[in-house]
Amino acid sequence: MLSDETVIALETALPTILSINEVAAFLSCSAITVRRMITDKQLPAFKQEAEWNILRSDLIQYLSDHSNI
């Protein structure tokens, strides 16, 4: 679980809606990995104008669920 301070910092630093490339850059992985996470239902996403997008809140929840702190 992420600390309250970390969540606040992420909410301040990240846009409300992120593209696959933005999430990939943030997670230091490839866009293909992010697409796989979406396909495997690990990371919620939605399509808008033929592009996958991820809500900041869903990314923060994913990070919180996969945090080892």
Image (cartoon, rainbow, N blue to C red):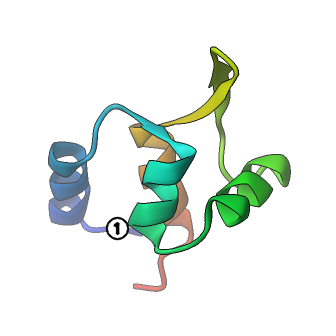
Residue at the outermost top position: 49
Q: As rendered, which of 14 and 64 lies closer to the eye?
A: 14
Indicate the quadrant where residue 16 lies: top left
Residue 27 locus on image (x, y percent)? 46, 69
The C terminus - image quarter: bottom left
Residue 46 locus on image (x, y percent)? 66, 27
Q: How many marks?
A: 1
Indicate the quadrant where residue 5 lies: bottom left
Residue 48 locus on image (x, y percent)? 61, 17
- The answer to whether any part of residue 61 appears in the image is no
- Characterize the local packing of mark 1: few (<14), some (14-19) or many (20 or more) Cα atoms within 10 angstroms: some
Judge left or right: residue 35 versus residue 49.
right
Judge left or right: residue 63 versus residue 38.
left
The correct choice, above or below, for 31 with respect to 49 in the image is below
The N terminus - image quarter: bottom left
The correct choice, above or below, for 9 with respect to 51 in the image is below
Residue 23 locus on image (x, y percent)? 48, 54
SS at badge 1: loop
Indicate the quadrant where residue 25 lies: bottom left
The correct choice, above or below, for 29 with respect to 16 in the image is below
Residue drawn at x 40%, y 40% as measured from the top left: 56
What residue is pinned by disc 1? 2
Question: Label 1 sits on what residue type?
Answer: Leu
Residue drawn at x 70%, y 65% as measured from the top left: 33
- The answer to whether any part of residue 15 appears in the image is yes
Residue drawn at x 34%, y 68% as measured from the top left: 2
Residue at the outermost bottom position: 68
